[in-house]
Each structure stands twice: as structure tokens, then as C-alpha cells.
Image (cartoon, rainbow, N blue to C red):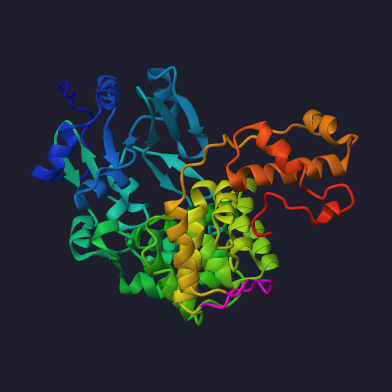
Amino acid sequence: MSKLIQGRKADLDGIECSTKTTHFLDELPLDLVDILNLICENGGGVWIVGGAVRDWMIGHKPSDIDIAVDLTPEEMLEIFNDAILTGEEFGTVSLRGKNCLYQATTLRTDGEYIDGRRPENVTWGKSLKEDLERRDFTINAMAIDVARKLLYDPHNGRTDISRGLVRAVGNAHQRLSEDGLRIMRAYRFADRRESGVWEIEHSLKQSISQQKHMLEPISRERIWIEWKKILGGPNSGLIIEKMALEGILDRILLGEWSNKFLILDAMKDNLERFDELEKFALLLCICSEKEVQTICSNLKLSRRERERIQTIHKRFGYIPNQSKQSMRKYRFILGEFAEKNLVLGKIILENNIKISNEKTDFFSIKDLEDRLELLTTLDKQKTDGEPIADGNWIMNQTGLPKGIRLGRLKSWLHTIQIERDITNISQLERILSTLSWENSDFNQWPQLKFPP
């Protein structure tokens, strides 16, 4: 690592970093070291803050590294002429590294919180002490001076990490009244990956119970960002159960969730293979299609996210027939999700969950296991998936004009192509001669759909 330049000192006492933390600091990216040095060369103080420090204390490699500076945003933009002002209101600039952006935020004090979402005003400052006092939880209120190898921990975040505790900085009631989203963040930070689920400190838990209403004025987009991170956590099932029993889910989803024990138990299964949207779809399997649409709309999910969750939800309660042809079609339509869909169905049955879909097949866990086994033994698909028979070829073979009937016949042939893994047009030509396409109702012709 390049030699580090010492910047302006902090206004509070620090302690020497542990050997473990020093090891992380010695492995800092060179582009970040250059950024730290440039700030110090220009008379600034700079500290790594927030999640990176917390993760180092726990023993994790942080996904990103944020820094705090005692230079104003204008001064930072003068030093870094390619920087991006990404949070003018809160003094945040994005500094270009070699392959990423580093967020640098000016030390500040916050004005009064009137709307429970954001301060009325912020004041740039030089005090690291005051900046750490405005943060949400003790485990996020630590800072490191990299050049001096000093840790600043005025609120005993290290102790709370060793105890496995999420505790507010200062008065818990005040911290939540400043920003209701901190309720969601408390649950998110309680999921400590392989360290399990941490406790939420008693006064903070009480404040959450008393101030659940503080979630109401928070934008649904901000709620969804935190909720998605909770769903993506390795201990999400345990966190979701806590949120349900403590009345938080009722504030962000439709209905009453504290008594939905079967689905809450299912969420505690090993869901490591599933992403956050797939887990959310499983949680909503007891909701009606209309309720799912409303929940996704209320949380302001993107169109892609809404469609994915709704598609998974619509497939609950259906399985393909136990034949190679049906399984090839099923695999083609669902792609990489084909196995996951069957596993989700198995989880639902194993936990005796009654899903809301009234038009479901009746099948057993054994049926699902048989499908899973057949899916894994299927040969790799030979056909590339694109229709071999195009519209012109079908018109030449049948004399059909352009229109719905031609399109549906093309879809039928494509379905047969996938089911039988056909790779050449001559095979389809022979099959076409056996189909009763001339006098039958095209609305009844097979299509590449699942469920049917």
C-alpha cells in the first residue's frame, strides 16, 4: 500500500485499531488510498465511516466503503474535478475510483426533524464527534483514521457488536422520530449473516413498538429498498417472523401477519438458493392475485419486479405432467427457474400452507419429487429454442393466409418442437401432416404456456 498522509485530526479520542482491522486497512484499494491522500494534501480530515467499519469489526469484507470529510462539497469538487455531486442536500459527492465510485460526505449536524423523514436543514461542520452523534445505531457510528490507524467509537459500537446487539445512538425514541425508516433499518441490521440474528436492544424495541406509525409518511420507494435488503439476507425468515409478530409487516403489507404461522415457518426453511423477489413471492403465496398486485403497487416496485413476483405467484399450485414432453416444455418456459418453482411448491406443501389460487391442480409432495427427479435426468435440449417453422414456410405448406390462425399454428408447431426436441424442418413437416388444424378450433391448440 502507498504511504498514507495524515490529515486533520478528529475532535475526539481514538484507540489503536485491532490487528484484524489493521489487516483490512492494509488491503485497501490503491485508488481509495490515492483519494484519501489527495484530501489530506489539501488540508482536509478524512475518515472511513459507517458500514465498512462495522463489517471490519465483525470480520466481514465490506461491499462498499464510504468516507466522511471535513471539507465542504464545493471544496471537494475543486479537488476532484471529475467528481459527481450526488447528494447536494446532504453534502455527498461520488469520487471516481478505478472500477467504482466512493461516496464522500461532508461532516454535518442536522437541523430539526419535523416530518419524520429528513432534517429541515443541515450545517456543514468540522466535528467528527457531532457527525457520529446524529447517526442511527451504535454499530454504524464508528470511524477510522486510516493514516493514524485510529478507531473512533464514542458510542461503544464495538461492545454492541461483541454482544450481538442493535442499539440506537443516544435516545432511541428520538432517533426513530427523526426518521421512521430507521425501524426497517433496525431489522435489517439484526441479520448478521453467519453470525445469526442479533437482538434489538430493549429501549429501541420499545420505541419501535410505540412508533410503528412513523413508517406511514416514509416513501414506499425507501421502504421497498430496505425491505428488499431484508428479504435478501441469509436469516430473512427469522427477521420476517420478528417483524410479523411485532406488527411491522402490517404497516408495509396488506392484512394482519402476526397469526400467519404456517407461512412464517416456511420462510424459515433453507431458502439460500432463492433471491429476494422469489422469497417475497413465497411469502405472498397466501394472498390473492389482486392482493399481490396491490402490495407490489403500494411498495412502488419496478415493472420488472412486479411482473416477476406476479408470474411466480400465478404458478403456485400447478405442476407439469409427468412425461418427458411436458417436462421439456416446462423447462423451456421457466428456464433456470424451473427447478426452483418445483422446490417452492414442495415447501408450500410440506408446511401445509393453503394458497389463495383456487384453480390449482391436486398433487402430493411425492408428485413434486418425481418431477424434480425427471427434470434433473432430462437430456440437454438439442433444439436452439427458436421456431424452426416460420410463417412463410407454414403458408406454403398449408395455404393459410396471414392472421390469427396462422400465428396459432406456428405456436402449436413450436410447442411440438420443444416437447419432442426436434431439430430439423423435415420432422416438423411430417408432424404437420398429422395435425387436425383445418377444421378444429384454434383456441384449443397447444401453446408454450405454463400454467396452461
Q: Position of residue 429 (x, y in %)?
A: 73, 36
Q: Is there any visible trace of residue 16 in the rendered image?
A: no
Q: Position of residue 274 (x, y in %)?
A: 43, 56
Above or below: residue 214 compared with residue 379: below
Q: Which residue sits at x=44%, y=31%?
A: 93
Query: The magenta stretch spans which residues?
Result: 353-362
Q: Which residue sits at x=68%, y=66%?
A: 289
Q: Is residue 254 left or right of residue 433?
A: left
How many labels were placed on the picture?
A: 0
Quadrant location of the N terminus? top left
Is 291 or 87 nearer to us in this picture? 291
Q: Position of residue 393 (x, y in %)?
A: 78, 29
Membership of 360 in magenta stretch: yes
Is 437 or 11 nearer to us in this picture? 437
Residue 16 found in image quarter: top left
Residue 150 found in image quarter: top left
Q: Which residue sits at x=35%, y=63%?
A: 235
Is 12 or 164 nearer to us in this picture? 164
Q: Position of residue 364 (x, y in %)?
A: 51, 75
